[in-house]
Amino acid sequence: MVHWSGHNSSVILILTKLYDFNLGAVTESSLWRSVNYGSTYTKMNDKIRSKTVLSYLYVCPTNKRKIMLLSDPEMESAVLISSDEGASFEKHPINFYIQSLLFHPAQENWILAFSHDSKLYSSMDFGRKWLLVHDNVMPGRFYWAAVGLDKDQDVVHIETRIAKSRAQYVRCRAQRCTEANRQYLFPGYVDTNSLVVQDEYVFTQVTKSGRASYYVSYMREPFKQMQLPKYCLPKDMHIISTDEKQVFAAVQEWNQNHTYSLYISDSPGVYFTLSLENLRTSRGPAGNLLVDFYKVEGIHGMYLANKLIDNRVKTFITYDKGQTWALLPAPTTDVAGNNLHCILPFCSLHLHLEMSENPYTSRRISSKDSVPGIVVATGNIGTELSSTNLGMFITSDAANTWRQIFEEEHSIWFLDNGGALLAVLHSTTPFRHLWISLDEGKKWTRHSFSLAPLYVDGVLMEPEAENHIITFFGHFSHRSEWQLIKIDYKGIFSRRCMDGDYQTWHLHNKAEPCVMGEKQVYMKRRPGNRCMLTQDYSRIYSSEPCPCRAYDFECDYGFDRQADGKCSPAFWFNPNTTTKSCSTSQSFLNSTGYRKVLSNNCKEGGKTVFSPRRHACQPSPPRGLRLSTSQGELAAPIGTNVTFLVQLDQGDSQKTHIQLHFGDGIKITYSNLSRTSDGIKHVYSATGIYRVTALAENSQGSDSSTLFLHITSPVERIHLSAPMVVSRQREVNLTAVVWPSHSRTLTFFWWFDNSSEPLITLEGTVSHTFQSEGTSKVTVQLSSGGVVIQDSKRITVKELFKSLLLSFSPALDDHNPDIGEWRADVGRVVRSALAQASGFPAERLLVSLYPGLPTVGELFILPDTHTQSEHKKSTQEALERVSDTFVNILNQGLIQFELKPEIRIIVYMMHQTLAPLVDSGSIHSGPALLMLLSVVFVGLAAFFIYKFKRKIPWIHVQAEDSQEKDPEVISTVGQNDNMSKVKLSEFPSQKDLLEKELETRSRGGIGRNMERVITREFPNCTNV
């Protein structure tokens, strides 16, 4: 370990350790100190008065004169402290083993220490005394307060483990973190290893039912759920950057395995839009995710990324913070001046963007704030990024043009605040030469730094220093001692730079002068001038704002960028939704589909085309009322506080009354929704199942939401499969599919419409007859091993209806995540298109998509509700005519919709061809006789199924001509009527349940739903 002490200091400290391969351990350590930039070194072991092995050296980042050494805990647990750059040390024993330290960003004496047994300690006197902060702390998930954001500077943010995959976010003060002084700012548990505190943001993650949700707190405000595009369905997320009050996140979507997509947020970090798909990623030595994404220093909005396209990795660049991406142009000639003939887009320059974790080696790509526009990187020219035939490339004009400077890979550092470049060969063999360039890599001079070739292990230099000292360290052979070589390169400069030594250059993007909304002119030293740069000279010479254009704005949440550059609503997004905080006599800003790129300085003209437009708030009824518990569970132990959360998607929250019925005879009323922001707490005193109902009401209307809460019974996952449309007074089978399959006894609770008592079964299938026309709601709950989950569906009941099976363009299968919400949204879009193309009322159409692949749907055509029931024949004829109209429209391919930019889906009618059963000739052929026998067999099978349909859960009989269907699932809110609780004592006993199940099995009944294979046929149409 090598450390250069404070700014412009001449002190260098080196900690060396001797590893015994026979013992497999470090047996000796030495501390060396130089006070003359590395010219001579003094061994400090005698002065620190410790015979123990030293394991690590820490330096205070806010005062580099303060040094802390850790002893090897296997021999002695102690810290050695210096306040004079290592000239003297004082030893302090400690009673725990330190694994890592975290220094305060502003207070030089404040330190957090993480121990081997997952405990967190704090010291306010630079390690002399330690106090326990918290136990069961997750490694690396503890953070000091951010200056200007947290109220007190001694605040710490901690993730503490509660169970195997559960943790809590705790905030407290470092020296006063007792239970009474702890704050739990996130309502509920979080996933382990998910807390990230970075700049203005706090991030965390919660996984429920196998689906992760991500939350953010901006400027230490309450947490909000991060909103990615609806069907992103993330499997994993990593925060890349929070610069400039904006979040860059790498998200692995549901259909990605080895790549991630780049998403960019608004300032609060809530609403994200897609910037670039399929970023290349890898894993570091510790298993951490490494994303091929690089921010170019000194130029706002300029980033590089490696993207996987057709199994090839290519390097792309953006100048507008991810709005547009383009391939890098290759140099026109190689090092020798030979023409390369590399033409875009078939051939381009590709760069390695991974960052080195070794502080003593250079990065494979480098840029610097003090010399904007200069980027040096390792890469290759061709059709894709390669790990062979690598060379070194440089740009001086912000990646508009590139030059090759070496044919082999080199390590390159910026010297003199970026005014000079130092290069050494990246080699496993020893060497003794280095190269220096003063003209941005156009010419290189070779210098010898050693009499004999040296294996170079690293290079040490102090950033931003004015001493012009470099230290090479390495060894002459694998058996030789460590060698340190000091180089003072000040002699290559003749003087300090003056005003006449600088020139200007104009930032541009392929001749476009406006970058990030302004024309920018920078200053740089004239290439070749042998003068030293001063640290304080201005790099930006002038800047002038440009008129705003489309690409100065990113597409707002819910909008997609089209091929013409315009932002249009995604198929799942409704841009006309009014904010719930919108009150009568007020106004709100409604998005035009664009939001200005942060740090973009363009100026809009008199007509604001892209900025949000103000609209008057119109009175609106409450819509989208949601009721849940703070933990997201539908069960709670008796006698504990249950916190209910009430959320409203639309409606005036300030003038909407909220009423909550707890289901145990107690209810509570609030004058507006804001009073429920902290949740509504309630304690149940008896076990049972409670119908909890929330009612939102204002002068324009009302909405309700219901959940069924099990006391003392935890819950899990379930899927209700039921037809979308059924016949009145015809028996129908309803099936509950369970994930995962359970070996324990399952208890199912079935709720129909406004029933106050459930139907309780041991099998996941029931038969039910709907007596009246209309819309009925069915809710099924599953209880197993203290776990309760539920699913609901609304079913349309009709005397007569008509249905047609639908198929889709194959491209829809590639974007089908196979979840109910997606199928419901696609069904809604298809229904709207059918109504528009035919002029048929949309309220008389229902479209359902079936689970699985290929994607198949069913169109239900409902009769006119005003038609009298006695006109049955005319209604049937009318449905036949309408059906024929839709068949014609579908056969012509007139029903289409845009799934995403440049992907259009055509909806067809699914056809089925029937061959004649018997030959028309006088002689019956063998195949004809075989076909006739098949008809007889099918008839017998149909009779058997009809006779025993109650024993086969998936058979659904609508009428004599009905066909089997695999219905769609649509989740809906619960009913708002009151119910009395169902006491657990009223359930059948375990013995009765077991006897009933054994009796069912002895009759040939089917067991768990997930343990059987269902086969489905799709008829051409269903006529009832």
Image (spheres, rainbow, N blue to C red):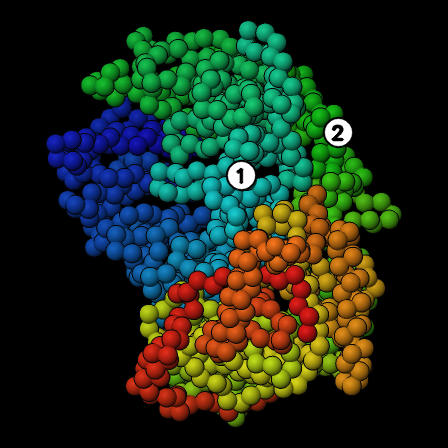
Q: Which residue is drawn at 50% across and 31% down?
A: 353
Q: Name the quadrant of the C terminus.
A: bottom right
**x, y percentage for residue 628?**
53, 74
- The label nearer to you, 2 versus 1, is 1
**x, y percentage for residue 993?**
35, 84
- The answer to whether residue 359 is left or right of residue 455 is right
Closest to the observer, 319 or 1022: 1022
**x, y percentage for residue 271?**
62, 55
Q: What element carries label 1?
A: strand
Q: Name the quadrant of the N terminus.
A: top left
Q: Which amino acid does label 2 sit on?
A: Pro
User: Of all residues shown, which one is farthest toward the left?
Assistant: 22
Closest to the observer, 173 or 776: 776
Say whether marks 2 and 1 touch (CB < 8 Å). Answer: no
**How far apart are the two marked residues, 2 and 1, measured between alpha carbons?**
28 Å
Q: What residue type is labelled 1?
A: Leu
Closest to the observer, 345 or 865: 865
Label 2 crowding class (10 Å Cα cut-off): few <14, some 14-19, many 20+? some
Depicted 703 relative to depicted 511: above or below = below
Residue labelled with disc 1:
279
Residue labelled with disc 2:
513
Q: What element carries label 2?
A: loop
Q: Residue at x 28, y 43 (%)?
A: 81
User: Of all residues shown, which one is farthest toward the right?
Assistant: 606
Q: Residue at x 30, y 86 (%)?
A: 991
Closest to the observer, 860 or 513: 860
